[in-house]
Amino acid sequence: MNNKINKTFQKASWLNRGALFVVFFWFGFLKIIGTSPAEGLVTELFKLTLSPFMELETFLPLFGALECILGILWLMPNLTKWAFLSLMAHMACTFLPMVLLPTFTWQSFLTLTLVGQYIVKNVVLISSSWFIYTLYRAKEEKAHLLDEPSEVIENLTVTITAEV
């Protein structure tokens, strides 16, 4: 049974890696070739933050290239830590329009615009990357998550119960 669970975790990890690759590489490539539907939002955020330091024409393809690289990093398990940290930094920037550009992201209290929804869905990318990173760390630290998942779940349950 544990071997079956181990294989399931590994498959889920690779499905998540593949999904992150597709999203970041595709969206990054659209920025490189200048056809990204997010270009307007990125441009407005750029004007508020980075415009004193570089030209938009330089930033957009560079930003797209970095997103493509981030996607590729997810396909290299030995670079999982760097992929995760890079994604977290990217996500911090991705959520900036929620605060800095509220007219783009909010219709009214608790009601997002389509752009706001586009940004908030990034919690799924965060969750997916966290899942991969957690499995990677467990394997790296020689934890028993992949070999004995029932033991880890039992320990987690005991920890949660003790904290409550």
Image (tube, rainbow, N blue to C red):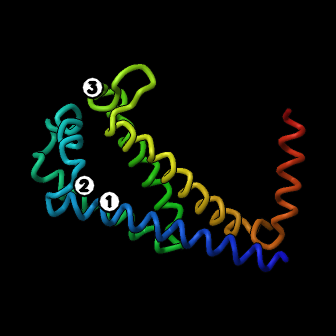
Judged from the image, the secondary structure of the residue bearing numbered disc 1 is helix
**Where residue 150 appears, x then y in whole percent?**
86, 63
Q: Which residue is mark 2?
A: 63
Which quarter shows the N terminus? bottom right
**Which image quarter: residue 54?**
top left
Q: Which residue is mark 1?
A: 67
**Where residue 51 appears, x then y in whole percent?**
15, 38
Q: Earlier in the sequence, mark 3 or mark 1?
A: 1
Tell me whether circle 1 and circle 2 mark residues in contact (CB < 8 Å): yes
Residue type at tag 2: Phe
Residue type at tag 1: Glu
**Where residue 133 appears, x then y in whole percent?**
59, 60
Relative to 95, 10 lies left or right: right
- Say above or below: 163 vs 68: above
- From the viewer's perspective, is the residue at label 3 or at label 2 nearer? 3
Relative to 150, 66 lies left or right: left
Q: Which residue occupies 38% across, 48% down?
A: 90
Q: Which residue is mark 3?
A: 103
Tag of residue 159: none
